Image (cartoon, rainbow, N blue to C red):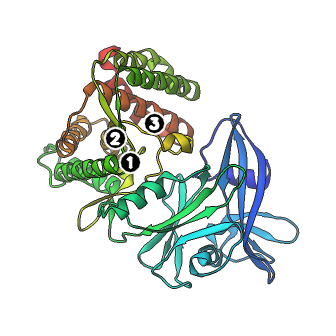
Amino acid sequence: MTARADYLSRQRWFAGGREVSISQVESRAWIREPTDGFGVRLELVTVLVDGIEQTYNMPMSYRSEPFAGLEGALIEHDGDYFIYDALHDAHARTALLSGFFGADIEGLTYTGTLPVDADAPTVQLTAEQSNSSIVIGDNLVLKLFRKLGHGRNPDIELSRALTDDGCTQVASVHGWITLHDEREGDVDLAMVSDFIRSATTGWDSARASFRDLLADPDAEASEAGGDFAGESERLGETVADIHGRLAVLFGTQSWGPTELSALAGRFDERCDAAASAAPAVVPYVDAAKSAFTVLRGLATTVLAQRVHGDLHLGQTLRAIPGWLVIDFEGEPAMPLAQRAGLDSPLRDVAGMLRSFDYAAQSVLLQTDTPGDDRAIRWAEHNRLAFLDGYGGAVVPELLRAYEIDKALYEVVYETAHRPTWIDIPLDALKRLLRDDA
């Protein structure tokens, strides 16, 4: 592998794969020419992952001399320059934002106005997975999209539409950066939105609740001081409000037997792909497909619309005014065009229900606590509270199919990234498929 491909393969935001080879490195724009020994360049790195092309956004910092503190971000020395990941370089981060303040950067368009000074301090966040983010000043965050696709990024599209609609349950969008590509269409590189400094992620809040429950061995989920059900219900109300707004803003479709049969087919394909990527899935393929087959016989009509696409507790913030939902980019592994398609809102509901189980089970795993039935009861307690808050008609067979599909995805993810966590989705898969075993 080249130095760039080697660096890429070690990043948390890299989608991964069994076979990775570099296909192309494109130098698309000098954000700052290195005339004085320091420059910043936008580079797109395309790799073949299991035979499929993936393109990544990798802005580079070029320095004629090694720069103290950036040793961990060094990609290579090409004979003239020490080349770093620009997101780790404070001077490069400032240069990357310069287009919002009047700098003319050929090939890039900066849309929007940022309510900060051009020299506002920046800090890189370290908890990202599929993207990279930097805090600007006190109240803004730039999210750099790492895995790229041609067309409007759903995070910009949906977040901007909800912002313009007056929705206070999302982080307001202030601007975005786009790369011009006359051959295949423009590519969104980054977006800037409000940074809610005082907020806590739903993931952290939920885990804290379950830890409080574990601290009282005689308590049940509804009795412990950390009962989370009230928050879960309010979160359900928030998600329902956002879904309602998206339905009005982008329109809906009705899915009948034909569309539900096609959905079952897509689930079958994802199941086969999961079994190929994660051997632990193989024993459950037949039962999963049996659950998906039920959709082919449903004599009902369901709503399809724009959805979040990758909703879980980590995509929510608990702020002083209430819940916010963030990161409308969709499931990172899916092509951009698919993420912008219509789907049942139950995909989002299923993702959140799985997240309650994950939160509790992860606490048991990380504290080396033996299996505790209270984790299952806590998750069910919050599951019901979320559904109460969400309201509306839920087709149980469809919701179950989405939950199984999500659990299969989780097994694949843990196989590739956190093998010691694989029992969390596997145990959930067993419970979800018990009726078909």
Q: Which mark is residue 361?
A: 2
For marks 3 and 2, give the one nearer the viewer. Answer: 3
Q: Is residue 333 visible?
A: no
Q: Secondary structure at mark 2?
A: helix
- Mark 3 / mark 2, whichever is N-terminal: 2
- Mark 3 / mark 1, whichever is N-terminal: 1
Crowd rating for badge 1 (residues with CA inside 10 Å; few <14, some 14–19, many 20+): few
Q: Left of 113 or right of it: where is 206? A: left
Q: Which mark is residue 250?
A: 1
Q: Left of 196 or right of it: where is 83? A: right
Residue 34 sits above or below residue 295 on the image = below
Residue 45 sits above or below residue 139 on the image = above
Indicate the position of residue 349 as horizontal and vertical percent values. Answer: 31, 40
Instruction: From the image, tell me which residue sits under label 3.
Output: 410
Q: Splitting the image into 4 quarters, where does residue 342 fall?
A: top left
Q: CA distance from mark 1 to mark 2?
A: 36 Å
Q: Is residue 257 visible?
A: yes
Q: CA distance from mark 3 to mark 1?
A: 29 Å
Q: Residue at x 45, y 23 (%)?
A: 262
For marks 1 and 2, give the one nearer the viewer. Answer: 1
Q: Nearer the viewer, residue 357 or 56?
A: 56
Q: CA distance from mark 3 to mark 2?
A: 13 Å
Q: Are marks 3 and 2 in contact (CB under 8 Å)?
A: no
Q: Left of 388 or right of it: where is 157? A: right
Q: Which mark is residue 160?
A: none
Q: Residue at x 33, y 14 (%)?
A: 297
Mark 3 residue type: Glu
